[in-house]
Image: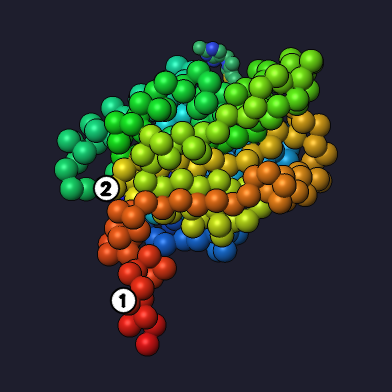
């Protein structure tokens, strides 16, 4: 994981598979690529075995394009649909037992800091709502309370999609699923509030049909996690199979859910604002007087 691992070893270039050559020559490693340029560079995630039309896949694809330094990023995942796509990406992926992703990421991010010192290595967890809010809940909360510096992304499809439709803590009250035929009996868990209480420095809720917004949230979350503290993104990534959403209506559903109960929200701690302004030139977080001077 560095630009070196992406390059060809001397003398091997001519023997590399076409896909690999394409990735080295036209991929995003070592360059600044954005979601608006998608289609003009080779993406780190292209092929995957997810269901056609799955919104989670689109979100994962956008998230990976948004990583500030993909060549120095390690993703961590767990059982669930998302890992089927994330594990196909051309960057390292660590997969543990179901629910232990934040424990693994805590150790990994500490170890990387010891091993690489000042060299930045980003750790990003992407796991389902079951993996994050149910079975992995304890480790997620502890990693936040302990101020572990990595990003946690919940792929919230509001169901256990990979195992055929059990309810999760993030399923909405009353929802009827294949394996929750009487309807869910309690409210959707408020993981955003918990992230706030546990001290996350950046928290956002997003849906995948606004690629620029997804990109901006992921970038901020990853940058802040480098030095300030844990960051959390909760993304509505509908399961068109378990919720019987016709493939051509997936984005429409995301829009209407966003308008109704999954509004874009963003919390940035004061420390994180100052850090983004000072280190990465985010003008919107400059103190008011300084921002006015910059605009002149
Ligand atoms: C310890 C353990 N228990 C149960 C399973 C079976 N299992 C695999 S994926 C999954 C549900 C995943 O749901 P979620 O985390 O919401 O992700 P999704 O598939 O919906 O993306 C379960 C229960 C497992 N792999 N390991
Ligand atoms: S089961 Fe649902 S979440 Fe899983 S890949 Fe299919 S549509 Fe996506």
Q: Quadrant of ligand 1?
A: top right
Which of these two is toward me, 28 or 114?
114
Q: What residue is drawn where x is 39% and y is 23%?
A: 139
Which label sits in the foreground, 2 or 1? 1
Q: What residue is drawn where x is 34% and y is 45%?
A: 225
Secondary structure of the residue carrying tag 1 is: helix
Measuring from the top left, give residue 255's x and y in whole percent: 72, 51
Secondary structure of the residue carrying tag 2 is: helix
On the rendered structure, is 144 left or right of 263? Answer: left
On residue 201, which mark appears? none
Ranked by sequence position, the earlier of labels 2 and 1 is 2
Which of these two is toward me, 128 or 283?
283
The residue under label 2 is 227
Proximity of marks 2 and 1: CB atoms separated by less than 8 Å? no
Q: Is residue 200 above or below residue 218?
A: above
Q: Residues within 10 Å of mark 2 (few under 14, many from 20)?
A: some
Which quadrant: the C terminus? bottom left
Query: Is ligand 1 less than 8 Å from the beta carbon at label 2?
Result: no
Q: Is residue 267 at all visible to an observer of this figure?
A: yes
Q: Is residue 177 above or below residue 150?
A: above
Q: What residue is drawn where x is 60% and y is 59%?
A: 39
Q: Residues within 10 Å of mark 1 (few under 14, many from 20)?
A: few
On the rendered structure, is 248 left or right of 230? Answer: right
Query: Is ligand 1 less than 8 Å from the beta carbon at label 1?
Result: no
Measuring from the top left, give residue 198's x and y in whole percent: 38, 34
Measuring from the top left, give residue 124's x and y in whole percent: 41, 39
Measuring from the top left, give residue 109's x and y in whole percent: 29, 35
Looking at the rendered structure, the number of numbered marks drawn on it comes to 2
Q: What residue is drawn where x is 30% and y is 53%?
A: 271
On residue 290, which mark appears? 1
Quarter of the image for residue 155 reads top right
């Amino acid at each position: 994981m560095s630009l070196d691992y992406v390059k060809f070893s001397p003398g091997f270039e001519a023997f590399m598979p076409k896909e690999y050559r394409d990735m080295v020559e036209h991929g995003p490693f070592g360059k600044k690529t954005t979601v608006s340029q998608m289609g003009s560079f080779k993406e780190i995630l292209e092929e995957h075995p997810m269901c056609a039309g799955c919104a989670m896949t689109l979100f994962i694809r956008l998230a990976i394009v948004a990583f500030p330094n993909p060549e120095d990023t390690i993703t961590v995942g767990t059982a669930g649909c998302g890992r089927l796509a994330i594990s196909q990406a051309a960057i390292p992926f660590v997969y543990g037992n179901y629910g232990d992703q934040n424990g693994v990421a805590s150790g990994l991010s500490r170890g990387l800091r010891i091993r690489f010192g000042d060299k930045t290595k980003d750790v990003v967890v992407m796991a389902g709502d079951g993996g994050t809010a149910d079975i992995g809940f304890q480790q997620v909360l502890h990693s936040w309370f302990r101020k572990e510096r990595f990003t946690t992304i919940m792929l919230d499809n509001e169901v256990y999609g990979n195992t055929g439709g059990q309810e999760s803590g993030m399923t909405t009250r009353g929802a009827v699923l294949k394996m929750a035929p009487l309807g869910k009996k309690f409210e959707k868990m408020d993981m955003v509030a918990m992230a706030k209480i546990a001290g996350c420095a950046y928290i956002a809720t997003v849906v995948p049909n606004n690629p620029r917004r997804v990109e901006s949230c992921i970038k901020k979350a990853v940058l802040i996690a480098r030095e300030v503290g844990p960051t959390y993104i909760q993304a509505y990534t509908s399961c068109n199979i378990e919720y019987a959403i016709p493939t051509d209506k997936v984005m429409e559903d995301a829009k209407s859910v966003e308008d109704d109960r999954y509004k874009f929200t963003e919390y940035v701690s004061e420390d994180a604002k100052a850090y983004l302004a000072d280190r990465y030139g985010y003008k919107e977080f400059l103190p008011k007087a300084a921002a006015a001077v910059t605009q002149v």
